Image (spheres, helix red, strand yellow):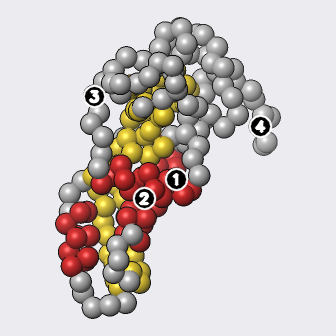
């Protein structure tokens, strides 16, 4: 039996204030009570609670940039066209410990992700909490994070000057938290 399409009005889980959702957005903060909200199509209300953290130093006059932040363990197998080099050791050392991934939760071009993602993995910013501030619309779903994290790892590995031939990447991520950064 085919079920009819049902429209569910999105309202805050805490105070029932309507959520002014725009197409492609997947997360919001209630303007009235500050509750973080994540689109959840499997929930009857259409939303789940979401923790939103704001970094210290946000400019209240400019929207912050939302990032999904998660700890990630990387399993990597790589081969090169050349004989073993110190780059294999560098890769093993880099991925031998968990890394913090900062994945833009707002719309960015692929080249920006390829530049920004590796830079933030290799030089992660300090996460110090600050007061709430406005931020860019959240359009990247947490469901997309494993593939985006693998893309960031691939960008890092492709940036090594060792004639990379083949790479297999497997990333395991912790539950992401939405951080708003300057």
Task: Report helix, strand or loop for mark 1.
Answer: helix
Q: Which of marks 1 and 3 is nearer the N terminus?
A: 1
Q: Earlier in the sequence, mark 2 or mark 3?
A: 3
Task: Report helix, strand or loop for mark 4.
Answer: loop
What residue is rendered at 55% in x and 39% in y? 106
How far apart marks 2 and 3 lie (CA) works out to: 24 Å
Task: Please identify the quadrant where the C terminus is shown.
Answer: top left
Q: Earlier in the sequence, mark 4 or mark 1?
A: 4
Residue holding disc 1 = 112
Residue holding disc 3 = 128
User: Within 10 angstroms of label 4, few (less than 14), some, or many (20 or more) residues?
Assistant: few
Q: Which of marks 3 and 4 is in front?
A: 3
Residue situated in front as seen by the camera: 149 or 63: 63
Residue situated in front as seen by the camera: 11 or 36: 36
Residue holding disc 2 = 152
Residue 26 location, quadrant: top right
């Amino acid at each position: 039996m085919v079920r009819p399409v049902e429209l569910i009005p999105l309202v805050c889980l805490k105070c029932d204030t309507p959520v002014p959702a725009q197409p492609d957005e997947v997360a919001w903060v209630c303007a009235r009570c500050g509750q973080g909200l994540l689109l959840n199509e499997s929930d009857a209300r259409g939303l789940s609670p979401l923790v939103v953290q704001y970094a210290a130093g946000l400019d209240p006059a400019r929207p912050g940039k939302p990032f999904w932040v998660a700890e990630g363990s990387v399993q990597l197998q790589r081969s090169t066209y050349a004989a073993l080099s110190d780059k294999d050791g560098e890769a093993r050392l880099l991925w031998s410990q968990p890394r913090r991934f900062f994945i833009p939760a707002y719309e960015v071009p692929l080249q920006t992700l390829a530049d920004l993602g590796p830079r933030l993995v290799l030089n992660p910013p300090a996460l110090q909490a600050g007061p709430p501030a406005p931020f860019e619309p959240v359009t990247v779903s947490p469901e997309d994070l494993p593939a985006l994290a693998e893309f960031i790892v691939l960008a890092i590995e492709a940036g090594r000057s060792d004639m990379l031939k083949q790479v297999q990447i497997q990333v395991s991520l912790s539950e992401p938290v939405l951080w708003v950064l300057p």
